[in-house]
Every structure is written in structure tokens, then in C-alpha cells.
Image (cartoon, rainbow, N blue to C red):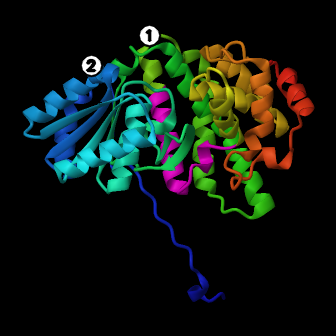
Amino acid sequence: MSDMSDFSKYKTMELPRTVVVGHGVLPSIPENCDRIGLPKSALIVADIVTKTIAGDETARLLEEAGYSIDTVVIKDADAETVSAVQETAAGIGPVFLAGVGGGRPIDVAKCASFNVGMPFISVPTAASHDGIVSSRASITVNGVKESLDAQTPIAVFADTGIIVKSPFRMLAAGCGDIISNKTAVLDWKLAHKVRKEEYSSYAGTLSEITADMLIENADQIKPGVEESAWQVIKALVSSGVAMSIAGTSRPASGSEHKFSHALDRLAKKPALHGEQCGLGAIMMMSLHGGKWEDIRDALRTIGAPVTARDAGLAPQEVIKALVVAKDIRPDRYTILGHEVLTAERAEKLASGTGVI
């Protein structure tokens, strides 16, 4: 028998305590905040659009329940904005932050809350990516978009009646982000095999199942259908939980995300994050020797881009992003470190999968 004293694994998992998804869930925010035991003071972070869509209503509901409310309206998700929100929160005293929006307000709120050690709740108004639940934030630092440590939301309130009214392009992009979990998990398994990186079969399986559910039910994701918003939000939450279980973004971020981040840096007009990840997943699945056509067909059925032209990207931008993507987060081993792409190989990959 082995000596049990040799066992030394240690892990911390941060999961949302409360997830409320469905039609008309905003009124449930105060009672759930009370139940969780959050401070009676909140700082709402929104942009000019999402403040009108859900920020003002969230503030009204909390104020009527006895909460003291301050609101910050942001323009960008950059380091300067995060610092300003941190200073505002620290000046108010014990508060929780509420990110109300699609990407930028939630990223700023979760990053600021992480830095000042205050709770954070997520109130998404669109379902364009899994950042509504994850512990990573996409923040521009010195002109370059970076993926930073952030606070896992203690609660998520996703009102499908609001989300279904957002542009369908955003919902389709969210599907691209989820479906790209397929290649992220393959990259994670590769890193485990080649570099002995720790791999969580539970988190990996959950992430794969979540992606498979959307691939298999792609024909059910339609514009203006609240049930579609329901399905995508549930998948985004599941993807976020997989990352929390793993203690890393590995279950949902691999070579396809490196490709997307490279495009963010070099494209004249980058597409939405989930759109770029979807394109990346098509090509990375081909590199892995998998059924990339299944990913392409699902994205096409949903209405997400499957070519550079669909996404408003130039062919040369795609090729260059494929070549330099390996240098994004070089510590994260993926198929791009295993199969180094020259410009010629990148062009062959992109054309062979129909992306260009």
C-alpha cells in the first residue's frame, strides 16, 4: 500500500453561488443578493447602451430594496478604466460590483473587483462569449488586448427576455466561443501528453459535452427566439463552470483563442471574439486531424461566420494571425507549438478549410 502522506494535491475552485437564467429574472436580483449576504451598497458598471437596457432597471430594483447605488458609465475596457472603477469602489467603501452588459462592462467590473477584493455579480445583456461567467477578463493594456485574472461572479442573472433582443450576431458569436471548446480541450490533452501539464478529465469532458450540445442542436439557434438565448446562456454558464473546476481557462481557450488574440492585434477591423474563435476552431481542428467540417457546418447553420469574408477579415490578416498566434501566451502549449506554421502552410490550412 502507498503511504497516504505522499499525497500533496491542493486545489481551490471558485464557482458562482447563484445562477438565475430565464425570462424576467432581473426582479430576483435584490432577494438573491440579500440571501447571499452581499453588502447593502453596489457599484453598477455599464456602458451608455447597456445602462439603458438593464443598468437603470437593476439600479432601481436594488434601491427599492434598500441598497445604496452608484453607477459608472464606461467607454472602453482598458487598464485606465479598470483603475478608475477600482478607485470609485474603494472610495465608496464596502460594496459589490455589478457588471451590466455584454463584454466591456462585465470585463471591467470583474477585473476591478478582483483587484480590490470585492464581490462581483454578472448581469449580461448579450450572450456573445463565456466571459459572463469566467474568471478571466479581456482588458486593453498599453494598446494591446490582454487576458487578465479576474473575479468569478458570485452570482449571474441572465434575463433571456433582454438577451434575445440583442443583435443575433452576438448570440451567434457566443455559439462560436462555445463550439471552439472542442479544439481547446484537444490542445489541453496535447499539453498533458507532451509536457505533462495537469489535466482535469471532469472539466475537459464538461467542456466537450457543452460544445457538442450546440453542434448537435445548431438548427435550434435562431434569431428572435428566446429559447435559443436560453440554450446559449446555459452553455456559456457550463463552459464557465468547467474553467472554474479546472482552475484555468484551458477547457475553453487554446490555439483558436491564440488565433483570435493575434487577429485583435493585427487586423484592421477585428471581428467579434466568438466569431474569430469559431474560425480558428475550424482550422485548428483540421490541424488536429479531426472533423473540422462538423464545426464549420454547425457554425454555418447557426449563422456565424465560416470564412474570413463573412467576418470582415482580409485573407492576409488570417494568414499572418495563424503564423504569429504561437507567440501569444507562449507558456500555453497548443497544436500551434506542435505544428509550427509558415506563411505557406498557413495559407494552405486556411484555403483547405475554406476560411479564405
Q: How many marks?
A: 2
The residue located at (52%, 13%) in the rendering is: 222
Indicate the quadrant containing the N terminus: top left, top right, bottom left or bottom right.
bottom right
| Residue 311 to residue 179: above or below | above
Q: Amino acid at mark 1?
A: Gly
Residue position for label 2: 52
How far, Cα to Cα, is label 1 from label 2? 20 Å
Side of 273 where 258 appears, left or right? right
What SS does tag 2 mark? helix
Q: Is residue 12 visible?
A: yes
User: For this rendering, which residue is in front, 119 or 76?
Assistant: 76
- When asked about the image quadrant of residue 355, the answer is top right
What SS does tag 1 mark? loop
In x, y percent, where is residue 12? 46, 64
| Residue 114 to residue 291: above or below | below
In x, y percent, where is residue 142? 53, 42
Q: Which residues are magenta?
A: 232-254
Residue position for label 1: 224
The residue located at (65%, 87%) in the rendering is: 2
Q: Earlier in the sequence, mark 1 or mark 2?
A: 2
Q: Amino acid at mark 2?
A: Thr
Q: Main secondary structure of the magenta part?
A: helix
- When asked about the image quadrant of residue 133, the answer is top left
107 in the magenta segment:
no
In x, y percent, where is residue 322? 78, 34
In x, y percent, where is residue 254? 67, 44
Q: Is residue 355 visible?
A: no
Side of 77 where 121 appears, left or right? left
Side of 139 where 328 appears, left or right? right
| Residue 10 to residue 180: above or below | below
The residue located at (46%, 26%) in the rendering is: 127
The residue located at (55%, 37%) in the rendering is: 143
